């Protein structure tokens, strides 16, 4: 993984998006199980292993995450009201949502991931896995799926970005 500036991450992500190239990103907290450093990490993954970039910082890169999340998921993932009318979260996702709300009320920082098929963090169990890391218990809650969990993200992303970092 190549370490680059946050501006370069932004530029590469926007370029991938404009060119219709498969890409996604992760925001890793210092306590994240995927993070090898004690800083926040913004990880950008392009279409192949040679296009993995990271930027480390002392502060959470939330602004760039908010900008890129709708592009990466091709959906209004920051808008809970845009959820499909027929959507009902699974029991696992209900637990994630409830725990995220509880941690937000307590002012405890938490994070989550969506791993895609081909993502360096995907264990290969399914095409997509929604992963919630609980900072107090150290446990993860995982919700695998064959399709991208857009409606789940529409519930979780606004909670994530409403945290006070």
Image (cartoon, rainbow, N blue to C red):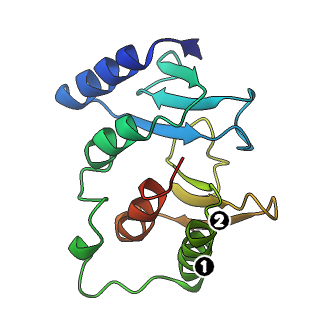
Picture quarter containing residue 132?
Answer: bottom right
Percent coordinates x, y for residue 117 in the rendering = 50, 46
Give the Cα separation between the discs numbered 2 and 1.
Answer: 8 Å
Callout 2–callout 1 Cβ contact below 8 Å: yes
How packed mark 1 is, by other alpha carbons closer than 10 Å (few <14, some 14-19, many 20 or more), is few
Percent coordinates x, y for residue 16 in the rendering = 28, 25
Percent coordinates x, y for residue 119 in the rendering = 54, 39
Q: Does dot 2 land on a helix, a strand or a loop?
A: strand
Residue at image mark 1:
92
Residue at image mark 2:
142
Q: What residue appears at the point 53 percent right and 37 percent down from the top-left corner?
A: 60
Q: Does dot 1 land on a helix, a strand or a loop?
A: helix
For residue 26, above or below residue 114: above
Looking at the rendered image, the quarter that the N terminus falls into is: top right
Query: Extreme left residue here?
Result: 18
Picture quarter containing residue 58?
Answer: top right
For residue 141, above or below residue 10: below
Left or right of residue 138, residue 84 in this image: left
Q: What residue appears at the point 60 percent right and 35 percent down from the top-left corner?
A: 120
Percent coordinates x, y for residue 97 in the rendering = 53, 75
Quick one: 16 or 100, which is closer to the camera?
A: 100
Whichever of labels 2 and 1 marks the residue nearer the N terminus, that label is 1
**Number of marks:** 2
């Amino acid at each position: 993984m190549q370490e680059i500036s946050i501006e370069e991450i932004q530029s590469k992500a926007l370029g991938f998006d404009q060119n219709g190239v498969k890409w996604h990103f992760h925001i890793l907290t210092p306590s994240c199980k995927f993070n090898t450093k004690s800083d926040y990490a913004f990880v950008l993954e392009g279409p192949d292993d040679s296009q993995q970039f990271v930027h480390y910082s002392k502060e959470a890169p939330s602004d760039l995450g908010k900008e890129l999340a709708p592009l990466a998921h091709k959906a209004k993932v920051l808008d809970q009201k845009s959820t499909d009318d027929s959507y009902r979260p699974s029991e696992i996702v209900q637990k994630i949502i409830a725990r995220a709300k509880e941690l937000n009320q307590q002012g405890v920082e938490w994070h989550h991931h969506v791993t895609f098929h081909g993502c360096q963090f995907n264990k290969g169990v399914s095409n997509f896995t929604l992963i919630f890391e609980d900072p107090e218990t150290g446990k993860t809650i995982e919700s695998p799926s064959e399709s991208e969990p857009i409606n789940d993200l529409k519930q979780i992303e606004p909670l994530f970005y409403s945290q006070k970092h």
